[in-house]
């Protein structure tokens, strides 16, 4: 591993007039569209500076949704993408991979969470939810304008696994790894491996012996 | 078990604990403590000569203390590895074992704990579960009445390798019980103790009932249950079989067990919910099916490994549906009951799944990590201007800031985990974080507060915990005020004071500063950096006369969706209570001071551009609001 810093600081944000942002507002079936009209968010987003194209999609993460984004990147020459849909914990990897397939740097995609953190939490206040969805989408659009293309950092891998706990789960994991030629250190805090299963008599539902 | 011992690529280290885990995916540096066994693994052949001569007997925990073992011992005859141990707490130093071992010279009283370091690419955590202690439920008399036993004791009693060689006998007089009761959900599904279901007790209750009935067909067996849960393949059929064998199932959690002191027989008092009748029935022996609980050292392991815990204390997976095997830390995976109670088939399946997840990494010559690291604009650094500083170095949990007085620091990229602590601490904005630059975050703040800022609650949340908590609030449909506007950074350490000044200058109604609990922090001590800054800000805002509730500092884990919703609702309530006029006055009164504190922001690269752009957004957004 090299101990050096990366030289990325000098990168200037993209010139405002060169921005071509694509905005995709997801229905997620009725998960989002059941609370707010996605079309209104699209219409609003379309007015913001830098947005070259805004569209709604039934399921952004589905094949059809991803294809739409990829096709649009080429068709409209998009250089930034905003997906207003669910949590980054759910689909950020999906949409990063999606834009990358269309030749865009994956770090030029930003998500606005209008499902978990909006429609699902504000079913009682549809108007408030719509205002919030617009704000969150605008916020993602403003952030995306300043995003820089980034490369993943590559690190070496030590080809050895540590399994902590020698119960039936740990033993099985260790065996599966070893059979793939991966060295394993199996650490057990007690004097023997086996865990609770080693203490059991016969086990349900087949009643075979447990050791 | 034996397969694992035989596999040449598996190094089994019993009596060993994980002391420290450093590094990151592909490159963990793990320190193990190999505890002294006082028997040399390279010499012991498992002949048991030492145990035979050892004069000391202590209860064997493996046998649930129902049988003794020697101070020179293995827990059971099939132990893996088959190497004896000397229990130093029990040993009386008679050295008979040394003599018995003779020429093998395997016993070595000078052995000490050994610390070893391993370079590891991926970690699988499979530390299992522990058992609820039913003696805290005095109504069942466990510990007082000899014939009230636990399920784990039963597993040993009816086990041919166990203390009674498989004879089903009761502790008080060694007689075979004629009339047995099993009580399910002892400690589980009980708001006083463990409110969740322990997953496998219904099934092992049925199992032990069937085994007892097979052994002694004329034994009367009653199982007391709340619900019988048999959702997996073949399980309902197993339950049917038990009923066909004549095992009785009575719905209702028993209220109390009493004992006849002369016979040591037990009476189970309760209600048969099906019949709606109060019942009191006598039994020779009662088995309590105790709840599965997290390991006693689970909190400790959670901080060693830096992985969070779900409500209830189990290890918390990255996503309950989509990534149930992954921990939130890249390269660390869960298998088995440590992630939540599960039976053997599920634990085995998860073991294989964890191996598959880990092998993706272990088969790759290189792994990729996110480039959201810190970078330096050297010109502005105080140190480079000859002044003493080093705030950045002190903030970094990983020693990734290479600081020397007189020059600007450099960031050692391979060590930087991207918490943003150095960025948030630097008084001159010399450092920024890729993907979370000041320009990016400030443009978000400006946009979110472009219209009706005084109505809004700006919520700064960390990626790992409070953003997850907000997700969970939504997933659980806990409703909270739609005036909340969230911004995500990686760690509370990145939550710059400038962001908060700018938010109030813009007229924000309230600001939430929220990250992980200290022990859950993804960046060792990142949260501490954030917490210190937050406390400083809180004190300052108080002195400036800011109304309570307008600046909240809350540590919210990814499991605390309810807390996230509650905090936002409380903040909304504070704003409502204050009322728009007073709030407006307060915002105006503080605005000049806030403005003064951020005059230098436009000097940060790209920030002036971000402001200009946000102004354009605002014009359009205001126009939209007016159009309504
Ligand atoms: C009474 C009873 C009867 C049961 N009967 C059945 C049955 O018939 N059929 C069935 O399918 N399931 C049954 N189960 C459930 C079964 O026991 C579990 O599914 C299984 O044991 C889970 O395996 P595990 O490997 O996850 O955990 P465990 O068996 O708990 O193993 C964990 C291992 O990790 C070790 N460990 C813990 N912490 C550390 C640490 N910090 N460092 C190193 N090592 C550590 C422990 O010592 C242990 O060896 C029963 C459970 C009980 C209580
Ligand atoms: S992208 Fe997210 S919000 Fe859209 S359909 Fe898929 S899951 Fe639903
Ligand atoms: S403080 Fe955080 S962001 Fe800064 S160098 Fe250290 S790990 Fe990286
Ligand atoms: S905190 Fe900022 S000013 Fe101080 S030494 Fe580090 S980079 Fe320089």
Image: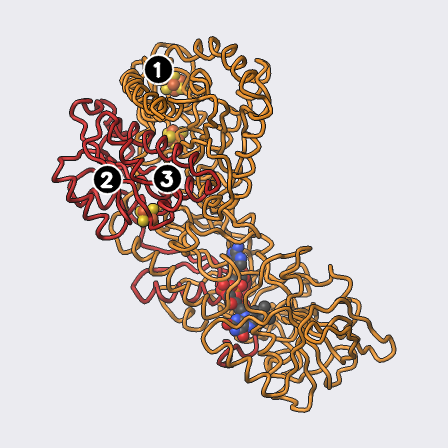
The local crowd at label 2, few if under 14, some if 14 to 19, many if 20 or more residues have their Cα within 10 Å, is many
Viewer-nearest of discs 3 and 1: 3
Disc 1 crowd, CA 10 A, few/some/many (<14, 14-19, 20+): many
- B70 relative to A3, above or below: below
Rendered image: mark on residue A113: 3
Determine if marks 2 and 1 fall on one subunit: no
Element under disc 1: loop
Q: Are marks 3 and 1 on the same chain?
A: no
Residue B10, picture quadrant: bottom left
Q: Nearer the viewer, residue B163 or B478?
A: B478
**Residue to which mark 2 is pinned:** A55
B392, B250: nearer the viewer: B250
Q: Which residue lies under the disc numbered 1?
A: B381
Q: Element type at marker 3?
A: strand
Image spot of residue B21 (x, y percent): 45, 46
Residue at mark 3: chain = A
Q: Chain of mark 1?
A: B
Distance from Cα at disc 2 to Cα at disc 3? 16 Å
């Amino acid at each position: 591993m090299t101990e050096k810093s990366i030289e990325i600081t000098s990168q200037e944000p993209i010139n405002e007039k060169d921005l071509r942002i694509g905005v995709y507002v997801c229905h997620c079936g009725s998960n989002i569209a059941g609370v707010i009209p996605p079309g209104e968010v699209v219409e609003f987003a379309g007015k913001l500076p830098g947005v070259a194209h805004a569209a709604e999609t039934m399921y952004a993460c589905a094949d059809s949704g991803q294809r739409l984004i990829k096709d649009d990147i080429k068709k409209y020459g998009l250089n930034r993408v905003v997906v207003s849909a669910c949590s980054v914990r759910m689909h950020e990897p999906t949409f990063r991979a999606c834009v990358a397939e269309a030749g865009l740097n994956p770090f030029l995609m930003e998500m606005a969470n209008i499902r978990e953190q909006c429609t699902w939490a504000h079913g009682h206040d549809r108007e408030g939810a719509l205002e919030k969805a617009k704000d969150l989408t605008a916020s993602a659009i403003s952030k995306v304008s300043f995003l820089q293309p980034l490369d993943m950092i590559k690190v070496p891998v030590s080809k050895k696994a540590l399994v902590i706990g020698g119960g039936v789960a740990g033993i099985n994991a260790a065996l599966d790894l070893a059979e793939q030629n991966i060295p394993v250190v199996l650490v057990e805090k007690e004097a023997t491996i086996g865990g609770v299963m080693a203490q059991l008599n016969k086990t349900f539902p087949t009643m075979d012996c447990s050791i | 078990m034996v397969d694992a011992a035989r596999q040449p690529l598996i190094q089994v280290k019993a009596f060993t604990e994980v002391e420290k885990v450093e590094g990151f995916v592909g490159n963990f540096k793990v320190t193990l403590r190999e505890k002294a066994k006082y028997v040399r693994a390279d010499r012991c052949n498992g002949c048991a000569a030492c145990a035979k001569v050892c004069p000391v007997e202590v209860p064997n925990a493996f046998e649930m203390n129902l049988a003794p073992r020697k101070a020179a011992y293995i827990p059971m005859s099939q132990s893996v590895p088959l190497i004896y141990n000397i229990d130093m707490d029990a040993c009386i130093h008679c050295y008979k074992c040394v003599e018995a071992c003779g020429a093998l010279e395997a016993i070595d009283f000078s052995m000490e704990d050994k610390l070893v370091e391993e370079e590891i690419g991926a970690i699988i955590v499979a530390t299992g579960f522990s058992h609820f202690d039913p003696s805290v439920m005095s109504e069942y008399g466990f510990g007082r009445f000899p014939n009230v036993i636990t399920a784990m004791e039963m597993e040993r009693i009816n086990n041919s390798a166990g203390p009674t060689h498989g004879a089903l006998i009761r502790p008080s007089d060694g007689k075979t019980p004629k009339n047995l009761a099993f009580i399910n959900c002892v400690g589980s599904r009980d708001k006083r103790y463990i409110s969740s279901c322990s997953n496998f007790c219904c099934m092992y209750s049925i199992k032990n009932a069937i085994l007892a009935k097979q052994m002694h067909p004329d034994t009367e067996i009653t199982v007391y249950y709340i619900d019988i849960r048999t959702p997996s393949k073949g399980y309902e059929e197993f339950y049917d079989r038990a009923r066909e064998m004549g095992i009785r199932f009575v719905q209702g959690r028993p209220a109390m067990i009493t004992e006849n002191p002369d016979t040591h027989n037990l009476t189970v008092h309760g209600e048969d919910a099906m019949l709606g009748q109060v019942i009191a029935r006598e039994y020779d022996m009662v088995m309590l099916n105790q709840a599965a609980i997290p390991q006693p050292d689970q909190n400790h392991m959670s901080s060693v490994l830096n992985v969070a815990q779900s409500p209830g204390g189990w290890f918390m997976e990255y996503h309950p549906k989509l990534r149930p095997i992954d921990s939130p830390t890249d390269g660390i995976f869960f298998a088995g009951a440590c992630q939540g109670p599960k039976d053997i088939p599920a634990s085995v399946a998860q073991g294989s799944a964890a191996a598959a997840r880990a092998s993706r990494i272990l088969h790759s010559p290189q792994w990729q990590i996110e480039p959201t690291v810190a970078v330096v604009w050297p010109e502005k650094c105080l140190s480079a201007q000859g002044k003493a500083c080093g705030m950045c170095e002190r903030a970094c949990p990983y020693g990734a800031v290479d600081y020397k007085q007189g020059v600007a620091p450099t960031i050692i990229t391979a060590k930087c985990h991207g918490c943003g602590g150095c960025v948030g601490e630097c008084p001159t904005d010399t450092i920024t974080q890729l993907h979370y630059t000041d320009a990016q975050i400030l443009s978000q703040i400006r946009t979110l507060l472009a219209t009706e800022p005084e109505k809004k609650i700006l919520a700064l949340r960390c990626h790992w915990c409070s953003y997850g908590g907000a997700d969970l609030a939504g997933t659980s449909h806990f409703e909270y005020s739609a005036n909340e506007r969230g911004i995500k950074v990686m760690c509370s350490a990145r939550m710059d004071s400038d962001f908060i000044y700018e938010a109030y200058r813009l007229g924000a109604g309230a600001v939430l500063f929220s990250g992980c609990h200290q022990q859950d922090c993804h960046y060792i001590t990142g949260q501490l950096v954030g917490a210190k800054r937050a406390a400083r800000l809180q004190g300052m805002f108080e002195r400036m006369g800011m109304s309570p509730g307008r600046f909240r500092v809350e540590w919210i884990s990814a499991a605390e969706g309810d807390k996230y919703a509650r905090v936002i609702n409380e903040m909304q309530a504070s704003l409502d209570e204050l009322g728009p006029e007073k709030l407006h006055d307060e915002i105006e009164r503080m605005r000049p001071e806030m403005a003064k504190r951020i005059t230098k922001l436009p000097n940060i690269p790209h920030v002036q551009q971000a402001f200009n752009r946000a102004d354009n957004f605002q014009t359009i957004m205001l126009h939209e609001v007016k159009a309504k």
